[in-house]
Image (cartoon, rainbow, N blue to C red):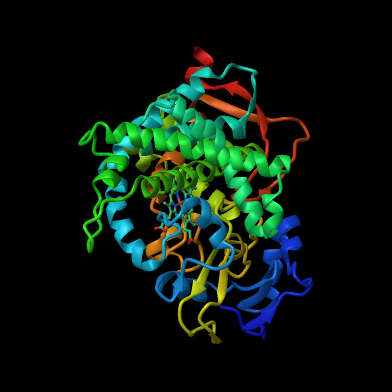
Amino acid sequence: MTTTPIPRKGTAPGGWPLLGHAWQLHSRPLEFLNSLTAHGDLVRIGMGPHPAYVVCHPDAVHQMLADSRTFDKGGPFFDKARVLFGSSLPMAGWREHRWQRRQMQPAFQPDRIERYAVVMGEEIDRMTDRWRPGQRLDVSAALTTLTLRIVTRSVLAAEAEDEAVADVQHSLHTVIDGIYQRVMLPLGPLYRLPTPGNRRYRRACDRLHRAIDGIIAERRARPGDGDDLVAMLLAAHDDDTGEPMSDEDIRDQLMVMIGAGFETTANTLSFAFWLISQHPEVEERLHAEADRTLAGRTATPGDLGGLTFAQRVISEVLRLYPPGWFFTRVTTAETTLAGCQLPAGTALLYSAYLLQHRPELFPDPERFDPDRWLDRPADSLPRGTHVPFGGGNRKCIGDQFALIEMTMALASVCGRWRLCPDPGATLHVRARGTLGPGRLTMTCEPRGKAADG
Ligand code: HEM
């Protein structure tokens, strides 16, 4: 890719003893990540006292993602998340992962997604039917409610009005933010002090556990009920031992699935509505496409062929602001990456944000340009270049779920409503557990059916 004489292995400047680059990662993480490409293809940083290498070259990222046995999940920061999410799918080492993924993959087959799409449509209607002309809307909150209701109803096969589901929804934000803070600022015993923040985090974890345990207990009492993810997990048996999954394992799987499946999609949609409000020509084309294809009704998966521009908008939003902006791996054996020897136990980090803002790969990378996907669909790019859903056998299990949900929501809203930003409003990108737009307030202006009604 690059012909500049950048050393393949480098070190990020500005690290502090014990803290490493924790401050840069906490205070200006995106700028810090983007600055690393100047120092090599594999750049050493300090995450607190622990060293890690950021993999900056797409070929090396592809090699790492394709070989999940040598480049396994793990590392010192990963262990913090394991405390809460156990050995669930995203946390599991490669050996358990293969079995787990086999158990859960059927829940994401196209016929299942068609079923979830019915829930998606109902929830999109529920959200947009409540909007009123001229209403000032907390867009990020509305979209978070939308995606959380969709994923909890799909994954738990439960009604979003259930008390337990409301508890899950309430606690998840606090838990996800708490984990992020513990990963980025590994202050060890300080997190055990009874500060208000630590107490809030603990309470949210307990509440989340109790809520999901209640749902599992209820389903165990009705064995053979349904063919959804909960039923699949209740029926799963270990290949070697024949043991079923424990309630605790099932709880971890469900919690992680919901945790991974709502903020990611809500943030992408929030960024999308912000970006189109700043690019009237894109907005106009989205409105025209929605009018042509939907004529005011809610999108279904059958409409995707007519919503190609909406899909390009989503691809471009995922490029500019990938919600999963960094992930970690650890080497399980001595290996070579980007021409460098790495001992077993080396911590690695890859960032979709960094890769997708490299100007050699995406010219004028800060420009929002859905048409950059016109001649080269996202799946035709060199591997390791556009990785909002990761890659290899650890690739996001919910990628099709998310893409269909986001396209349906974007097009259906555009067919009925125009979301207008407050005068002088600016975007505050927030890089925490996920990359998000913070609080985003916009005003609803009716179009089509909403204007008539
Ligand atoms: C815009 C939406 C989404 C984005 C950008 C996204 C991104 C990702 C990424 C990058 C990974 C791989 C992480 C790694 O390499 O370590 C991942 C894994 C995962 N995602 Fe998503 N995700 C999204 C939506 C969803 C949804 C809707 C669900 C579930 C309903 C979901 C469930 C998962 C799970 C369970 C894994 C772990 C897969 C494994 O290790 O086998 N995600 N996601």
Q: Nearer the viewer, residue 82 or 380?
A: 82
Q: Residue furthest top?
A: 453
- Residue 235, above or below 60: above
Q: Residue at x 38, y 53 (%)?
A: 397
**Residue 227 appears in the figure:** yes
Which quadrant of the rendered structure holds the N terminus?
bottom right
Q: Nearer the viewer, residue 156 or 408?
A: 156
- On the image, the x and y values in percent for residue 296 come to 43, 24
- On the image, the x and y values in percent for residue 81 come to 54, 55
Q: Residue at x 74, y 57 (%)?
A: 28
- Residue 98, above or below 85: below
Q: Residue at x 67, y 83 (%)?
A: 6
Q: Nearer the viewer, residue 120 or 75?
A: 75
- On the image, the x and y values in percent for residue 240 come to 22, 64
- On the image, the x and y values in percent for residue 275 come to 63, 42
Q: How many marks?
A: 0
**Residue 279 appears in the figure:** no
- Residue 379, above or below 84: below
Q: Is residue 52 left or right of residue 308?
A: right
- Residue 14, above or below 390: below
Q: Nearer the viewer, residue 276 or 318?
A: 318
